[in-house]
Amino acid sequence: MTQFYDARGNIYAVASPGYLRSRGIAVPECADLAASTRKEWAAMAIASECEWGTLPRAVNAKAHRCDGLLVGPFQAAPPFDVLIVNTDGTLAERSGNGLTIFSQALTDQGLMTQGCELLVHHDKHDAASPVETYSQPATFEQVAGFWLALGRPQFGPAAVAATGIGAVIRGQSEFSHVAALVAIDPQWGVSQFVRVGNPHCVTLVEHAQALPDHQSLHQPALFEPLQAIAFAPPGGRGQPCLAGINLQWAAHSSGNRVLARVFERGEGPTASSGTSASAVACAAWRAGWVEPGEVAVVMPGGTVPVRLQCQAETLLSVSLFGTACVQA
């Protein structure tokens, strides 16, 4: 059956390929083939497993009862293949909260008893597939969860295949100027593109008041122009990134603490996102807001601990800690 998990307000459904096939959804047995043929089955899987059905739907709730569908595992022993299906039927290269949830689901099924590789298969042409993430069971501040090693981040428009981007200098660093974001709010003129397995555009604002309100992100006046930027065609314009881009806004709080909001490619506003938190921490480090080590990224759904490992002036790796539980 399909099980729903919650990771700091980010909710994913988890279903095995075999279960989906039993529901008449033709998911191939091989993860690579499943990714390359997702147009043939992904939308049906979302409609079957992620709709509200007979469940009561709160006022202003999303069109779907979760933020996406995790399809996997495709095998009984590690490494484990998984597909991350957005609610618009597209595939994501990586999701921190999604992989935390998948790690917890594997643990609950007795398949994951120690650290192992999780391999996310996708069909994006601007990134290698599968994307590898090492998940390690751990306890952080007396909370059981998982550290996810996301590897070395990449910075700049080229890292996310962004085009038509202007430049802006802040201090001794060069950041990006995204005209479509500035057209929505003039305070959103300094952005940092970051790839942590998937692409992100982190807009750095001077004050917390310049962060978009989480609820306002759901309203058409803000949702629609942001969707045009974040979503790949046909859901959006695919500008500045043809494959779409995850959007974040960040404001420095104090010390190694950063406030953030998230608008995900293929999904929209989310209360929490692990890779978004990681991208925010990386952008905050490059802006000189935070020091290497543990960074707390505060989002409406909760606070995500992120660990930055640096050598001299180089950011070598980023990891995030996540925890998940079955949604009642």
Image: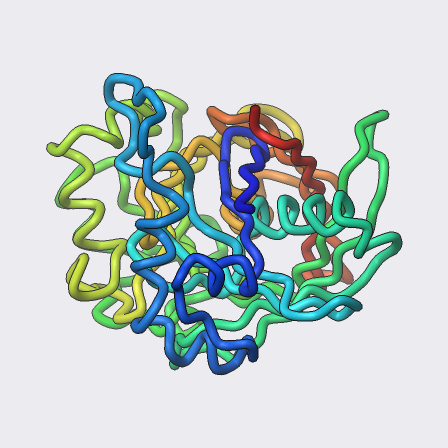
* Figure label count: 0
Residue 277 in percent (x, y) is at 55, 43
Question: Would residue 108 appear left or right of 244 to someone viewing this image?
Answer: right
Residue furthest to the top: 59
Camera-nearest residue between 19 and 60: 19
Residue 97 in percent (x, y) is at 58, 44
**Residue at the spot x=71%, y=42% of the render?**
321
**Residue at the spot x=53%, y=59% of the render?**
71
Q: Quadrant of the C terminus?
A: top right
Camera-nearest residue between 113 and 159: 113
Residue 89 in sight from this viewpoint: yes
| Vertical arrangement, residue 19 with respect to residue 161, above or below | above
Residue 96 in percent (x, y) is at 59, 49
**Residue at the spot x=17%, y=35% of the render?**
222
Question: Would residue 170 appear left or right of 154 to someone viewing this image?
Answer: left
Camera-nearest residue between 228 and 154: 228
| Vertical arrangement, residue 56 with respect to residue 27, above or below | above
| Vertical arrangement, residue 301 with respect to residue 196, above or below | above
Residue 207 in percent (x, y) is at 39, 25
Residue 284 in sight from this viewpoint: no
**Residue at the spot x=49%, y=37% of the render?**
11
- Specify how the rendered protein is coloured: rainbow
Camera-nearest residue between 223 and 260: 223
